[in-house]
Amino acid sequence: QYADDLVGLAESNEDAKTMVQGIHTWTQRWGMALGVPKCGVILWSDSQEEHDRHQATEYNTPDGNIPIVSEYKYLGIKVTEGLGGEDDYEKTYVTSQAEKGQKALNAIRPILLDKTWPIPVKVAVIRTLLIP
């Protein structure tokens, strides 16, 4: 069993190491294991000294070492060390999500505009298809 989509934020490498150990302890308490291949530790800092210290740090757990990564896909969003930068992943993601929402709205528009459909049914359609 795995707990999906867990994120921890820390102020320092030492705090991050402590957090990783705490997460491991939590998984043990609840009979779970870390999916180490799906894990990653990323640093957001402009300091070269912090980057060097980060690269020299090992984030060890009994389930395995959590890898240091420069980018990570979280809930479908690519997160990078630069948090955007020239690649502008966030804008691409938001544009993609907006297009999906527009497509879903266009698909249900005839139902929403039809006066013979009861409002509770229209609300259910919106909640089911437009706001998953």
Image: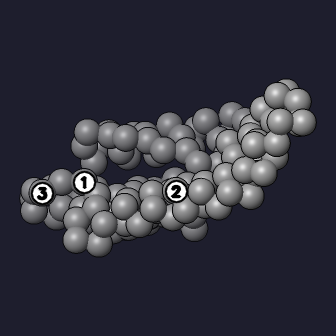
What is the CA distance from the residue labelled 2 to the residue labelled 1?
Answer: 27 Å
Classify 10 Å Cα crowding around label 3: few (below 14), some (14-19), many (20 and above): few
Picture residue at 78% right of the left edge, 51% below the top: 110
Crowd tier of the residue under label 2, counting other residues whose Cα lies within 10 Å: few below 14, some 14–19, many 20 or above: few
Residue at 41% across, 66% down: 92
Q: Amino acid at mark 2?
A: Ala
Pointer 1: residues within 10 angstroms few (<14), some, or many (20+)?
Answer: few
Which residue is the site of mark 2?
A: 98
Report how far apart the C-alphas of labels 3 and 1 lie in the structure: 7 Å
Three-letter code, disc 3: Asp
The residue carrying mark 1 is 44
Which residue sits furthest bottom? 87
With 33 as the anchor, is 16 left or right in this view? left
Mark 2 or mark 1: whose residue is earlier in sequence: 1
> At which x and y percent is residue 117?
88, 36
Q: Secondary structure at mark 3?
A: loop
